[in-house]
Amino acid sequence: MKLHFQPTHPHRERGLTLLEVLITIVILAFGLLGIAGLQARMQVAEIESYQRAQAIVLLQDMVDRINANRRNAMSYVTASPVGTDGTLDCSAPATVAAKDLCEWNNALLGATEVKSGGTCTSADPSGCIGAMIDARGCVINTAATMPLEFMVSVVWQGLAPTAAPPSTITCGSGSYTPDTTRRAVVARVKIGCLQNDPGGVTCL
């Protein structure tokens, strides 16, 4: 019986091996690019979550201040947003409400943490880094009869467009481009009739 052996082609085998290596490298490159993109999205989501947590703290801070000074709740209503681009005169606040609004304004600017060598004032907030990006706060009176009702809002600049807040949340509207990057958290405060001092509002 005669055995027939096929001759080997070492050059062709080496070529096939090189092609397989190149294909593997391309697949790995696409995988690494996908991982890099996923990591970037995770970092954005982490920053967004951190900013929302800060906003909730600042929102609850103002809600607590209003509840602690219920007789003068109307004094907390803001004519325009405080914080970024705010126009509050905090040199010598005359009332508790004015002092609370000034402290809230400074917290929204990020005065709790200042960049090394920078300044953090209403006139020059460039060194303020302790709050959200372009944070603003509003207190709006939504019911002028008893029970009084206030809407407290904190808005800031998001990193990626999502969906614009409802039209009822006007705080910071028009200050962010596009408006789909405006983030907002809202709380409502209701104050019943204080029998010993209704604050100038007739109890019904």
Image: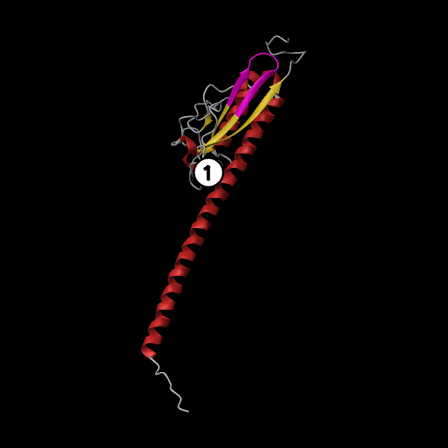
Indicate whether residue 149 is drawn in magenta.
yes
Identify the residue at the far right of this view: 195
Q: Residue at x 36, y 83 (%)?
A: 6
Spot occupied by residue 168 in the image (x, y as percentages of width and height)? 49, 22
Q: Quadrant of the C terminus?
A: top right
In the picture, measured across the screen, residue 170 lies left or right of residue 203, that is left
Can see residue 59?
yes
Determine whether the residue tagged by mark 1 lies in a helix, strand or loop.
loop
Identify the residue at the far bottom of this view: 1
Q: Quadrant of residue 190?
A: top right
Question: What main secondary structure does the magenta stretch of the protein show?
Answer: strand
Identify the residue at the far front of this view: 1
Q: Quadrant of residue 87?
A: top left
Front residue of 197 and 190 = 190
Q: Residue at x 45, y 54 (%)?
A: 35
Front residue of 133 and 204 = 204
Q: Residue at x 50, y 29 (%)?
A: 154
Label 1: how many Cα within 10 Å (few below 14, some 14–19, many 20+): some
Spot occupied by residue 54 in the image (x, y as percentages of width and height)? 53, 36
Residue receiving disc 1: 129
Can see residue 94?
no
Asked which colour scheme the image uses, the reply is: secondary structure
Front residue of 45 and 101 = 45
Q: Residue at x 40, y 60 (%)?
A: 27
Q: Amino acid at mark 1?
A: Ile
| Region of the chain picked out in magenta, as a range | 139-152
Spot occupied by residue 172 in the image (x, y as percentages of width and height)? 44, 26
Q: Is residue 178 above or below residue 116?
A: above
